[in-house]
Amino acid sequence: MGFFDAFRKQTPTEQLRKEVAKYFNKIAEDAIRDAAGDPFMAGMMIEMSIGKLYQELEQNYQLASICANEGINYKVLLEEERQRARKKYLRNA
């Protein structure tokens, strides 16, 4: 990322991707904290948390409708961010 990229206006897709990634990161980090050092439990909690958030966002028809109006492929973006979070927080994802 160059210096002037910081001043570039983000597209609606980039803005949404950033927000969705923030939510996936937060729930994964919360699961790690709640597992209290148990790696097995942390893995299970991360997988469940990511899956639950994915399902909730996938079933949010209002958000999907807004994305459709903006020309954002919501399902693809959501799946990409889910996979990114799994790879980031789970070793064998």
Image (cartoon, helix red, strand yellow):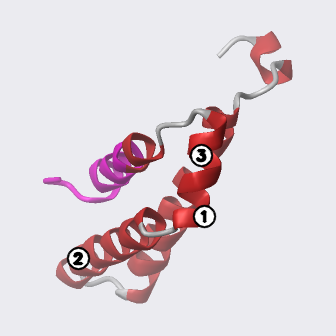
C-alpha separation, residue under disc 2 versus residue under disc 1: 36 Å
Residue for badge 2: 39
Residue 19, placed above or below residue 12: below
Residue 48: which disc?
none
Sequence order check: which comes first, mark 2 or mark 3?
Answer: 2
Residue 66, placed above or below residue 14: below
Residue 72 horizontal/vertical position (percent): 55, 36
Q: Residue at x 58, y 33 (%)?
A: 71
Sequence order check: which comes first, mark 2 or mark 1?
Answer: 2
Q: Are marks 1 and 3 in contact (CB under 8 Å)?
A: no
Residue for badge 3: 67
Residue stretch in magenta: 79-93
* Mark 2 residue element: helix
**Residue 49 lies in quadrant:** bottom left
Q: Amino acid at mark 2?
A: Pro
C-alpha separation, residue under disc 1 versus residue under disc 3: 9 Å
Q: Does 90 lie within the magenta span?
A: yes
- The outermost residue toward the left is 92
Q: Is residue 18 visible?
A: no
Residue 71, placed above or below residue 3: below
Residue for badge 1: 62
